[in-house]
Image (cartoon, rainbow, N blue to C red):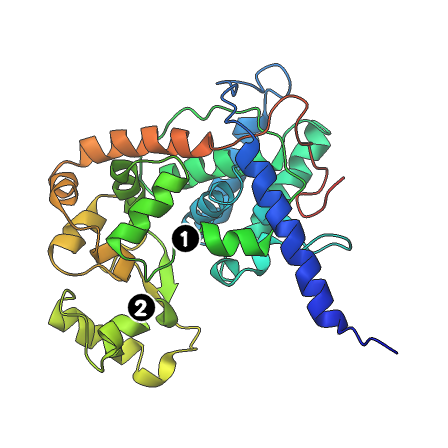
Amino acid sequence: MRVKIRFGKKMQRAWLVKAVVMVVAWLQVPLVRSLEIGFYATRCPAAERIVSRLVHLASRHDPTLPAALLRLHYHDCFVGGCDASVLLDSAPGYPPPEKMALSNRSLRGFNMVDMIKRVLEAVCPGTVSCADILALSARDAVVLAGGPSWKVPTGRRDGRLSSAVLARISIPRPQFSAVQLKKNFLWHGMSTAEMIVLSGAHTIGSAHCVSFWDRLYHHNFTNGTDPSMASYHAEQLKKICPISSYKSKQRVPLDPITPFKFDNMYYKNLNMGLGLLASDQVIHDKLTSVLSSNSTLWERSFCKAMVHLGNLNVKTGSRGEIRRNCRRRN
């Protein structure tokens, strides 16, 4: 008797098993908090200046780059920790990587990271991790967009595991409710207040029509528009993203007032019903009202939350590696 096995399903099961093993391994690893301010001071003194300079030069030609670099760091840290796993390409013997997950297919900035890595490898071979490049470039991106600066603890090493399955269950979605968002951040070890503060990063960047299409045309499985969205704003968005634009590549600024400036306008927009994503508008509460009127408090809180984010399940010491190419394992 011959038994026919469908290779596709078998491979899918194999990847799922590997993904489960990876999740268990990650959950069993305790948080490591041995990063240092000035880790490269003696190892590669020019490292932080190189990252800052290259990000600055590139952003002058592409004002959308700061938002892309900040988002890369977010999505990296939310999947297995800040270990540059989001940068890995597909490779034989490994499951589909994070960048293949639906939530990550719109990520940008990979070429920028590649360029920074090539320069650092030329200056200090095998010294600066791709994970630290992501953390440093995120900080520099915020500064270049007019936001606050903070000291970035460094010393991260790069992970060897990357899973699209884990990315799918780890990264919050644009359609999440307030309860789902709170649970997601709590699962990552972050508080509700930090969730609200970090959401302020949506003061720069943009989103595809599909990310908020339901709010315009199919709110709560009806044919209506989300009533929490200002009516005039909804009408403007419908002109940019008509009902037939579900799969359109058209992008819309997350902040319609100051789309390229890193400020607290995001919270002011929520007060006016101008939040673009459902996950933006649902977090509107007393804290967002406070942050909308106190930019200093938000900037200070944002810097502190970013340091916490950058510490999530980092790999240091003998864990991980320093990749020579951010897209491939050594």
Farthest front residue in view: 1
Picture disc at residue 63: 1
Could you tell me which residue is drawn at 17 percent across and 69 percent down?
233
* Residue 153 drawn at (x, y percent): 48, 23
Which image quarter is the N terminus in?
A: bottom right
Instruction: Give the SS element for disc 2.
Output: loop
Q: Quadrant of residue 281?
A: bottom left
Structural distance between the alpha carbons of marks 1 and 2: 23 Å
Q: Nearer the viewer, residue 1 or 157?
A: 1
Instruction: Give the SS element for disc 1.
Output: loop
Q: Quadrant of residue 191?
A: top left
Residue 226 makes an appearance in the image: yes
Q: Amino acid at mark 2?
A: Phe
Could you tell me which residue is drawn at 37 percent across and 47 percent down?
184
Which image quarter is the C terminus in?
A: top right
Farthest bottom residue in view: 244
Task: Please tell me which of labels 1 and 2 falls first in the chain.
Answer: 1
Q: Amino acid at mark 1?
A: Pro
Could you tell me which residue is drawn at 58 percent across and 60 percent down?
100
Q: Relative to 190, is 264 above or below?
A: below
Instruction: Give the residue at mark 2.
Output: 212
